[in-house]
Image: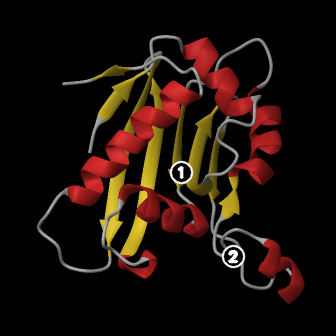
């Protein structure tokens, strides 16, 4: 797990809420404080979509940020910054499979319980914390290290400056 700090909050939040940079991620949960506090559970109710629609979704259990972002943008736009927000992103299953192939890790996609990005804005500071979950027992930290490396590369590729907290 690593902790990253984003010195350019305006740029980072613009890429988060107004651009497509994070659209491939799924949302496990979101909380946002503006005029009032909004809590969003990213789990899709089983009866919301038809069977055909579910087949087209990247992960039938969680909503994609691409779908949720316009709604959240409507909640935050205006003259005032949110008091705070927290978004727990999860890498979609098809991207977990790509990640494992790219890194050469020996896990099967079903071995990985989740690869997470936790974005938190509080006290006028924006941070990101990485996290991993395995469905199998393993003492090595290979998955953690590779995910942390991939996250750093993601932010560099998107032009989002960060500082690693020690």
How many neighbours does mark 2 have within 10 angstroms: few (below 14), some (14-19), or many (20 or more)?
A: some
The image position of residue 39, as x and y in percent, is 61, 51
- Residue located at (40% from left, 33% from top): 152
Q: Which mark is residue 60?
A: 2
Front-most of residues 74 and 156 = 156
Q: How many marks?
A: 2
* Depth check, front residue: 98 or 28: 98
Note whether 9 is above or below 96 in the view shown.
Answer: above
Q: Residue furthest bottom?
A: 51
Residue sitting nearer the eye, 80 or 69: 69
Eyeballing the image, is 73 above or below 134? above
Q: Residue at x 52, y 62 (%)?
A: 98
x 84%, y 88%: residue? 51
- Residue 139 image position (x, y, % from top left): 11, 68
| Disc on the earlier residue, 2 or 1 | 2
Task: Report which residue position mark 1 lands on.
Answer: 89
Q: From the viewer's perspective, is residue 83 above or below residue 23?
A: above
Secondary structure, mark 2, is: loop
Quadrant that contains the C terminus: top left
143 up-or-down from 70: above or below:
below
Quadrant where the N terminus is found in the figure: top left
Q: Is residue 102 visible?
A: yes
What colour scheme does the image use? Answer: secondary structure
Residue located 44% across and 57% down the image: 102
The percent coordinates of residue 94 (x first, y second) are 60, 68
Q: Does residue 48 appear in the picture of this structure?
A: no
């Amino acid at each position: 797990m690593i902790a990253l700090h984003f010195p350019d909050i305006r740029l980072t939040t613009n890429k988060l809420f107004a651009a497509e940079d994070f659209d491939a991620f799924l949302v496990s949960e979101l909380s946002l404080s503006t005029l009032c506090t909004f809590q969003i559970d990213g789990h899709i109710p089983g009866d919301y979509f038809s069977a055909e629609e579910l087949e087209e979704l990247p992960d039938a259990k969680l909503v994609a940020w691409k779908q949720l972002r316009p709604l959240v943008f409507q909640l935050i736009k205006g003259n005032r910054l949110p008091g705070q927000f927290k978004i727990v992103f999860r890498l979609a299953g098809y991207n977990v499979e790509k990640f494992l192939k790219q890194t050469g890790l020996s896990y099967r996609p079903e071995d990985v319980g989740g690869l997470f990005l936790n974005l938190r804005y509080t006290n006028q500071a924006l941070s990101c914390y990485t996290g991993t979950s395995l469905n199998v027992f393993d003492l090595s930290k290979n998955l953690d290290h590779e995910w942390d490396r991939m996250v750093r590369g993601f932010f560099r590729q998107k032009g989002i400056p960060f500082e690693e907290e020690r």
